[in-house]
Image (spheres, rainbow, N blue to C red):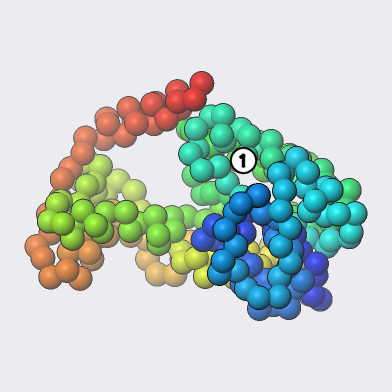
Amino acid sequence: MAEAARVLVLGATGTIGRATVAALCARGHEVVCYLRPGAEAAGLPKGITLRRGEIADIARAGFRGARFEALVSCMASRSGLPADARAVDHDAHVVALGAAQAAGVEHMVLLSAICVQKPMLAFQAAKLAFEARLIASGLRYSIVRPTAYFKSLSGQIARVEAGKPFLVFGDGQLTACKPISDRDLGDYLAGCLDDPWRWNRVLPIGGPGPAITPRDQAEWLFQRLGRPVKLRQVPVGMMDAIIAGLSLGGR
């Protein structure tokens, strides 16, 4: 799909969605964003088309009987709890997929997550179930599974600035990731329409540079603040308890 395409975007008001819309526009695609009623559209690029409605009405209010070449979804559940995850990460996408097929869409680009490789939580299982549905649909697909976002690594900045220790599980070196920026990920998602190598593939992706651990993050943050590193080690067993609690929540 090297030529300009007409693209419907879901989840356009999130940080990754906004970056993806900008990247699609920069590549010359005609972008239509389907937003929830009342969703804040400020900051989206000029020249796009905004349409609003519930996901159940996407065929009528989103596609409107017109032909689209592609559907790009950055839509995700907010809480990740079982009911929310099933409704958004799976069911809403199933509705959107059916409407896309009826609208003649040739290609769906789906923002998923690297953590579905080892599903332990409801939202991971819901995402994985829809991935399987998309793969079996016969539609050309690109399923993008990014590692951590830079923004997700910034959650402890405020507490460290307030003089509190950086929290790590175990010794802070149990996990490592290659975080990716919103702009890089948005550009990668948009590029899936043009790059045949990314078609009909599940695409794990991380940012540039080496993988970093939570301890690496802490050391970098304290260095930037000109302070000695101060960690608080949380027992790994607490992680299991948190996962169990999240899995049970909403049932």
Residue positioned 52% across, 70% down in the render = 183
Residue positioned 54% across, 61% down in the render = 16
Give the image quarter of residue 13: bottom right
Q: Is residue 111 visible?
A: no
The x, y position of residue 90, in whole percent, is: 65, 37
Give the residue pinned by disc 1: 89
Question: Label 1: few (<14), some or many (≥20) within 10 Å?
Answer: many
The x, y position of residue 167, in whole percent, is: 22, 47
Furthest residue to the left? 228
Relative horizontal placement of residue 154, taking residue 6 as reference (left or right): left
The x, y position of residue 146, in whole percent, is: 52, 56
| Front residue of 138 and 24 | 24
SS type, badge 1: helix
Residue positioned 73% across, 78% down in the render = 28
| Front residue of 167 and 177 | 167
The quadrant in which the N terminus is found is bottom right
Relative horizontal placement of residue 102, taking residue 134 as reference (left or right): right
Q: Is 178 drawn above or below residue 95 in the view shown?
A: below
Q: Is residue 127 visible?
A: yes
Identified by mark 1, the residue type is: Asp
The x, y position of residue 194, in whole percent, is: 73, 71
Give the image quarter of residue 106: bottom right
